Image: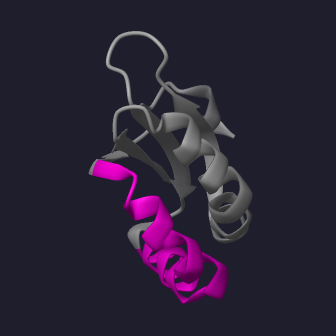
Amino acid sequence: MFIEHRTYTIRPGKTLEYLDLYGRLGWPAHSEHSVCKGHYYSDVGQLCRVVSMWEYESLEDRAKRGAALRADPRWQEVIPQIASLVTDIQSNLLLPSSFWEETRK
């Protein structure tokens, strides 16, 4: 199991627009194909950032879920609108520490 930690940099002044658009049109498709462990935006410090965390069992699971999402007509419709508000995307794959409670279940 691992978490994909994605950070999106949003065009200045467009964070609330991004969240509204993604929440209404992107989230229904995205959350159907992947397990979200958190979705946040920055309000202090480095602004214009949206962070999402997605859980996957393996790289194969991630690839399969990603392919299903990209094939979803709802996602295909909204992604150009979302992409126009994003200036950068960073993705990190995070592995659980051996002592983390969730890994012992």
Comparing 100 with 40, the one in front is: 40
Indicate whether 10 appears above or below 58: above
**Side of 8 where 100 appears, left or right:** right
Residue found 49% across the figure and 25% down from its top: 99
**Side of 50 where 103 appears, left or right:** right
Q: Residue 58, image x and y in percent?
A: 46, 66
Residue found 46% across the figure and 37% down from its top: 51
Any part of residue 103 in sight: no
Indicate whether 64 appears above or below 1: below
Q: Residue 36, image x and y in percent?
A: 63, 50
**Side of 36 where 95 appears, left or right:** left
Indicate whether 33 appears above or below 73: above
Magenta extent:
60-87
Residue 71 in magenta stretch: yes
Q: Quadrant of the C terminus?
A: top right
Residue found 27% across the figure and 49% down from its top: 87
Quadrant in the rendering for residue 8: top left
Number of numbered labels in the structure image: 0
Spot the residue most to the front: 13
Q: Residue 59, image x and y in percent?
A: 39, 69
- Which secondary structure type mostly characterizes the magenta part of the structure? helix
Comparing 105 with 3, the one in front is: 3
Spot the residue most to the top: 44
Q: Residue 18, image x and y in percent?
A: 53, 47
Coloring scheme used: one colour
Any part of residue 68 in sight: yes
Residue found 48% across the figure and 75% down from its top: 66
